[in-house]
Amino acid sequence: MPAFYRTYRPSSFAEIVGQEHVVRTLENSIKAGKINHAYLFTGPRGTGKTTLARLLARAANCTDRTGAEPCGKCVNCLLMAEGRSLDLIEFDAATHTQVDKMREILEGVPTPPASGRYKIYIIDEAHMLTTGAWNAFLKTLEEPPAHAVFILATTALHKVPETIVSRCQRFDLARFPVQDIVKKLSRIAKTEKLKIDEDALCLIALAAEGGMRDAESLLSQVATLQESPITEEDAALILGMTSQAKLAGLARFLAEHDLEGSLAYVRELSEKGENLSSFIPSFLRYLRILLLASIGPKAAETDLEPLTKERRTELLSIASSFTTAKLVEIIGYFRAAELDMRNSSIPELPIEIAIAKSLSDTIGTGTSVRELRHEEEEEEEEIIVAPVATETKKSIEEPPAPLPAPKGALREGNSPALRDRGLETEKKSADTPEPSTFSLIDVQDRWRDILREATRVNASLTLALSNARPKEVVGNKITIAVRFPFHKDRLADHANALTLTQAFDTIFKTKVKIAVVVEEKEAPSGNPLIAQALSMMGGEVV
């Protein structure tokens, strides 16, 4: 199978993906007939420097072009396409670095072009030239013949002498966005009738790190599988990378504070042959996107765009379980693990240490937080709900009887002190909230419906709400208790609080106010066995 980057190399400016600013400037110069004597294309590998140089050469010598596009049919276009043109000299500076080779090339510069208007020299990897070669080239570049055009391409601009840069029209080529790479890879796959998942294309685009040529080469490698369809796991196996699904798997365990599950997951990856040295850099990139997503949707918009809808939803859901500060802390641990991996005789150890530090609050409990939450929910259902609900309902339905007046009390209105006290009582009554149309037991009974309605509107609240419970109802104010401060921050966010309020409005058909608090863990004064159990399990007596 031929290399895709050769087969699908652009043959016109219209086929160039990205680099719009460079293409537009070159097209305008060609249309106006203003070809500069020297150009400098700089940028990372695989961003189209040599392709643009060849297109510029063909357009400059084309005798029948339409606008800026070479016709591809005239003698000059055909000779250049076949590599037989005497007016196009390509020089690989990485192979020929010495001054003697440069002088040999420059000796032919004064000779007029054979058939075209310009004699064009393309110097690839120009930064590899020696100081002597640059000095020999500088004299020609200062006073070039009218028919000579020099096009330099380099990936290391800082190695090109300033005297050369100042005499060239410079174009900086940027890395291709992942979504642009995915679009072109999709077109190639469709043309080649290659069935490949969109997740696999995204993985290839991420592996190319902004280089279109690299992406096309990697697609050629993956296409050798000849399987239908090629999945993300297949592509990850060929490329020696980690799939997005595996990265999300570990992130989900960290979000759930599941230390035991996280360590087992890493052990499973190692047993299945995962390259842990490449896993850490991939996971750091994933954590970076989580960090940006925790700051706000706009901060991560560029990184989320190339992901599929399912992967994007999954990532946002995981990001909602972390605070920004916690993600910064986790990233620090895994960056240290990346450095330690080079000297570790046990590949799993640096990752396991990073996980243990990230979940240090669960060390020593002997039980994962997921299991603790399940046990706590069962305890609440069996012990907490009935007594609290009964007491609350009673307090609402049976208001306390007024105290009898003391013997010999003055008649109402006869004493200024009593009048003042009456005014004060009326003022307090005015400040007392109106009694609600529902009680705490009503909220507890409909709690699952409320959660279902809230998560239907915003699925990212699932994890935070799974650890919440209604604590108190006073008037139209409902207090919700959570066990972790980061869950309080999540639910107290303005947009999320509005979602909760709407959920209550939908269920109880009335306007409410929401307050979120972190449950305080008080030591009991009774049975010492209960105190020991609460200390170990992190529970409370209600």
Image (tube, grey):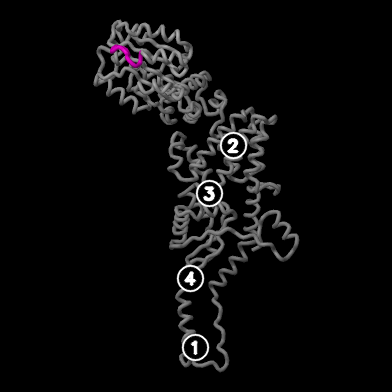
- The answer to whether residue 45 is seen in the rendering is no
Residue type at mark 3 is: Thr
- Tell me the distance, in whole angstroms, between the alpha carbons under discs 3 and 1: 56 Å
- Tell which circle, 3 or 4, labels the residue nearer the N-terminal end: 4
Q: Disc 4 marks which residue?
A: 435
Q: Residues within 10 Å of mark 1 (few under 14, many from 20)?
A: few
Secondary structure of the residue carrying numbered label 4: loop
Q: Residue furthest bottom?
A: 408
**On screen, 140 above or below 443?**
above
Secondary structure of the residue carrying numbered label 1: helix
Q: Residue at x 53, y 62 (%)?
A: 479
- The answer to whether residue 368 is seen in the rendering is yes
- Tell which circle, 3 or 2, labels the residue nearer the N-terminal end: 2
- Tell which circle, 4 or 2, labels the residue nearer the N-terminal end: 2
Residue 249 position by quadrant = top right
Query: Which is more toward the observer, 274 or 23?
Result: 23
- Tell me the distance, in whole angstroms, between the alpha carbons under discs 4 and 2: 55 Å
Q: Disc 2 marks which residue?
A: 335
Secondary structure of the residue carrying numbered label 2: helix
Magenta stretch bounds: 140-148
Q: Disc 1 marks which residue?
A: 417
Q: Residues within 10 Å of mark 3 (few under 14, many from 20)?
A: some
- Tell which circle, 2 or 1, labels the residue nearer the N-terminal end: 2
Residue type at mark 4 is: Pro
Q: Position of residue 254 (x, y in %)?
A: 60, 43
Q: Disc 3 marks which residue?
A: 462
Q: Foreground mark, 4 or 2?
A: 2
Look at the image and say whether residue 411 sits in the magenta stretch.
Answer: no
